[in-house]
Structure formats: structure tokens, C-alpha cells
Image: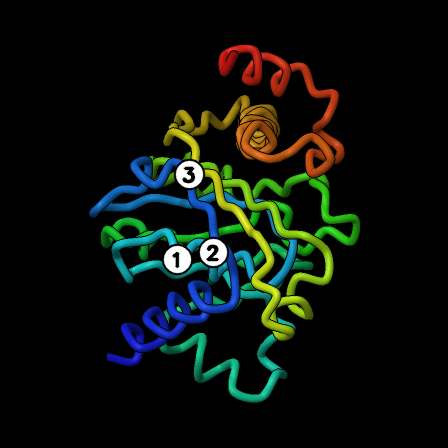
Amino acid sequence: MGRKIVFLVSKIVMAVFFRVRIEGSEHLPDSGPGIIAINHIGRLDVFLVIAALKRDDISGWVAEKYQKVPGMKWLVGLIDGIWIDRFNVDLKAMRQAQNYLKAGGLLGIAPEGTRSPERSLIKGKQGLAYLAATTGAPVIPAGVAIPKNCGYRALCLMRPKVSLVIGEPFTLPPLERATREQALEKGTEEIMCRIAALIPENYRGVYRQNPRLAELLSLKV
């Protein structure tokens, strides 16, 4: 019940305080496992994803720093959030995520691992690629575009425009021991470029000149 209330309140807040544009929601699975891979601009990202979902079994990795924020442990517990240490290899968080996917759940993960200070893509980390390759769960790329001072404008009832574009799901092949590192690097690049293809050019950051992004964009023309 607590989870349903969190999701209902989130959807109401988004509808009242923002003008939300969601594109590609047909790519979100109605059931079964999946990993929504999203660029990380701010705390509003997760609410945009919730606004797009018809199901409420989404969870995700949550940075360890939020354990010190009053009320966050309780809130994260309501949605079965998975605490992760972003600065060290966190095998416990990885196993929890793998088990959640194997049980048919949906995870929302920002492969950058932290908010981009420039609001544009920074280099992705390999955790999401590893998770996708070891579980076979489809990766659903998603790109958010949120203007600066969005929260302030929302509080002033200016209803700023925010958008979420969802791309087609894809899977990563299983890892082979001999080529593990190369596969993780290639898989991470694929995930990040698929996200980059869904967002405005000024949000693409370090992937702006990536050849794989150019290839993906050419397929959209």
C-alpha cells in the first residue's frame, strides 16, 4: 500500500506542478524484467519515470549518501530501493539488483552514477552493463530534458516544461571471461549512446562526437 501511495502522489505532483511530455511510453514493458537506463540531471528524473509508468514495481540503486537524509531510509524502503556504494565495488547491491530482475521487477538506473554538474552526459560506469549482461534483462534507454531552476519555477507555479523520451529496448550479450572488460566497455558505450540519441544535442556531453551516436542518429532520419 505504501508503494502505491508514493507512486500516486508522485504522479499528482508531476501533473500539477509541471507540463510533462512523455514520448515512447509504448516501449515500457507491462510486465517482466527491464532496466530503464536514464541520464541523471537531478532528483526530478525519478518522478518523470514514475509519471510514465503504468506499473508500480520499479526500484533502483540509491546512493549511499541519502541514508543520512531524514526520512529517506523509510521512503527508499517503501519502494524496495537498493542502497549502493558508488565509490567501491558493491557486490551486495549487484546481487540484490540481479535478484530483483530475476523476480520480474523493473529497475531504473542512471549509468553515470551521479548527477552531471553540467547537466550533460558524463562518462557512464560499467555497473549497468554488467547487470544487463549477467541477467539478460532488456535495457530501455530513456532521456530526460529538464530546464535550469526547474524546481524553483515549479514552486512559483510557473509549470515548467519537462520531457522524457523512451527508446526501444535492447539486450547485451552474455559476458565471456576472455573479453569481459572489452564487452563491458562496449556495452556501456552502447547504453550511453542510446540515451544520447534521445536527448537534445546540448545534453549529450562527452558522447556528442561518438561515432556510435552518429550511427544511431542517422537511423532516425
- Is 130 on the left or on the right of 147, as rendered? left
The front one of 153 and 56 is 153
Q: Residue at x 47, y 56 (%)?
A: 48
Count of numbered badges drawn on the protein = 3
Sequence-earlier tag: 3 or 1: 3
Q: Residue at x 31, y 74 (%)?
A: 3
Tell me the element at label 3: strand
How dense is the environment of label 3, judged by Cα within 10 Å: few (below 14), some, or many (20 and up)?
some
- Is 69 on the left or on the right of 31, as rendered? right
The quadrant of the image that shows the N terminus is bottom left
Residue 51 has which mark?
1
Q: Residue at x 43, y 68 (%)?
A: 81
Hey, what amino acid is under mark 3? Answer: Glu
Sequence-earlier tag: 3 or 2: 3
Hey, what amino acid is under mark 1? Answer: Ala
How dense is the environment of label 2, judged by Cα within 10 Å: few (below 14), some, or many (20 and up)?
many
Q: Residue 143: percent from the left, percent from the top?
A: 54, 41
Label 3 to label 1: alpha-carbon separation? 12 Å
Q: Are marks 2 and 1 in contact (CB under 8 Å)?
A: yes
- From the image, tell me which residue sits under label 3: 23
- From the image, tell me which residue sits under label 2: 48
Q: Are marks 3 and 1 in contact (CB under 8 Å)?
A: no
